Structure formats: structure tokens, C-alpha cells
Image: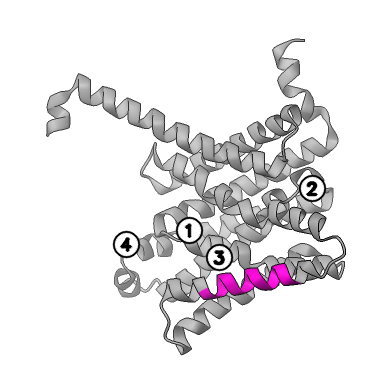
Amino acid sequence: MPVALFTSSPFAVDFVQRALLGGAFVSILCGVVGTWVVIRGMAFLGEALAHGMLPGVALATVLSLPVLAGGAVSAVAMSVGIGALQRRAKLSYDTSIGLLFVSMLALGVIIISHSGSFATDATAILFGDILAISPGDLVLLGVAAAAGVTLAALFHRSFVALSLDVRIAAVLGLRPRTAQAALVGLVTLAIVASYQAVGSMLVVGLLLAPAVAAAQWTDRIPSRMVLACLFGIAAVVLGLLASWYAATAAGASVTAAAIVLAALSWAVRAVIARRRRSVHPSVATA
């Protein structure tokens, strides 16, 4: 069998095509948002929001309601709760996130445990099912990706100033609190939109790994976003191929591929830097 046919044949199947397109939309959204998550050091917030949507998703699953709507409501509620704990209980940002993270995770497991199909529901919720993306899901993912990219473009200057110094953002009239709220909203949007593809347990890997891989090659934020999107799409392609031929879980395979690409990107960059130092030792010393 020719190699080209062997590697491309899965994408002749309708549900794999939908998975590829849906994964591409998710990769674009996560590539843009994940770049800011890495720059701002918001990985813990992303992890917490991914688990924070679990109660809403679980309740929607048990009640046969739209799971994305349930997850969105739950994630937004957690974002509001973090802010409330900071203001009223005078807790630090990471402490507020940690408390709500554990609470929401426990509540979600409790809700799922009352379902008659606990194992099946838990697997779908935690690890997603990218191969089950429907035409309607594609529309939602496309809208989410477009909204996320648009919002990131509108707040780009504010996000840059916020990353440098909150006081600078305030002096420039860029409203750092509004910018922070918009950034949290973007993270929430990316996590909720990615739920179908990789579930609540693996979404942070798809949010972070492509952005980390892109950061090895450029310091410019727009370039990092574009590269992160491309790394994410490559991870979707490789993950779907691995799932097809090795009979592995599709969502987990996509996330694993993203992490492998990040590791390879770092390793290749390190080798290139080492060779440059060996060829130009005076430059390295300087």
C-alpha cells in the first residue's frame, strides 16, 4: 500500500473529517489564548477552570441538557467565585483558585456518581470524544474560534501592557481590571469550547503545549500565536492518525501529540543553540 494512501485514508471518513475540522478550530482558539496563558503564567487558572466546569457538565449530562451550556455556566460561576473570594474573604489569588478547584471537582464527581452510567459519563466528561463532533458542534466551534480571535485582537494592547505592569496599563488608560476580566473570559471560552475534543482533564495540555512549543522559536507575540495554532493543528492530525492506526483514545492521543511536539521543539532548539555556541564561542561568551 502506498505511504500517501496509508497516512491519508482515515480523513476520507466523514466523522474523522469533522474531528479534524473541529480540532483545527479548537487549535486556533487555544493557540491564541494559550499564548497569553503562558506569558501571564495562568496555567493554574486554566487547570482550575477545566475542572470547574465539571459540575455543570455532569448535571447537564444527567438531565439530558446541552453539556456545553452546562459547562459554560459552571466555569463562569467559578470565575465569579474566585473574584468574590479575593474581594470578600481577602484570600490570595492562588488560594481562591485552589479552594474552588477542589470544591467543584468534588461536586462534579458526586453528581456523576448518582448517574446510572457512571463509567461512560465520566470517561466522556474527563477525556472528551473528538470523533463524536457533529455538524452543529462545528458551527459552535467555528463561532467560538472567531469570537476568541476577535476578542484577543481588540484587547491586544491591553494584554501587552498588563503583561508588563498593571500600573503601566492603568497610566495608559487601558483598564487593567477590564483586561484581566477579558483574559479570564478568553480562557473560559477556550476551555469550554475544547471540552468536546479533549474533555476537562486534558484541555490544559492543548492550551499550553502548542504555546510552549511556539515560544521556542519566536519572542513576538503575533508570531507565537500563529505558530501555536499550527502546532495545535499538527497535534490534531498526528493524534487522529495515532488513534486510527493504534486504536488509542482520540482525545488523549491529540493531547499527547501536542506535548510531544512541545518536547521536540524544545530539544531541537536546544541542539541548535548548542551548535551555535560551539561554532561561535566568542559570541556565546559575550
Element assignment for label 2: loop
- Residue displayed at 46% across by 70% down: 180
Which of the pair 139/57 is nearer the observer?
57
Of the two numbered discs 1 and 2 in the rendering, the one whose residue sits closer to the viewer: 1
Q: Can the viewer see residue 41?
A: yes
Label 3–label 2 contact, CB within 8 A: no
Which residues fall within the magenta stretch? 99-110
87 on left or right of 131: left
40 on left or right of 171: right
Earlier in the chain: of badge 4 and badge 1, it is 1
Earlier in the chain: of badge 4 and badge 3, it is 3
Q: What amino acid is at disc 2? A: Ile
Earlier in the chain: of badge 3 and badge 1, it is 1
Element assignment for label 3: helix
Image quarter for residue 247?
top right
Element assignment for label 1: helix
Q: CA distance from mark 1 to mark 2?
A: 26 Å
Label 2–label 4 contact, CB within 8 A: no
x%, y% of residue 241? Answer: 70, 30
Earlier in the chain: of badge 1 and badge 2, it is 1
Q: Which residue in the structure is indicated by mark 4?
A: 164
Q: Which residue in the structure is indicated by mark 3?
A: 48
Q: What amino acid is at disc 3? A: Ala
Q: CA distance from mark 4 to mark 1?
A: 18 Å
The quadrant of the picture occupied by the N terminus is top right
Q: Could you say which disc has been placed on residue 133 in the image?
A: 2
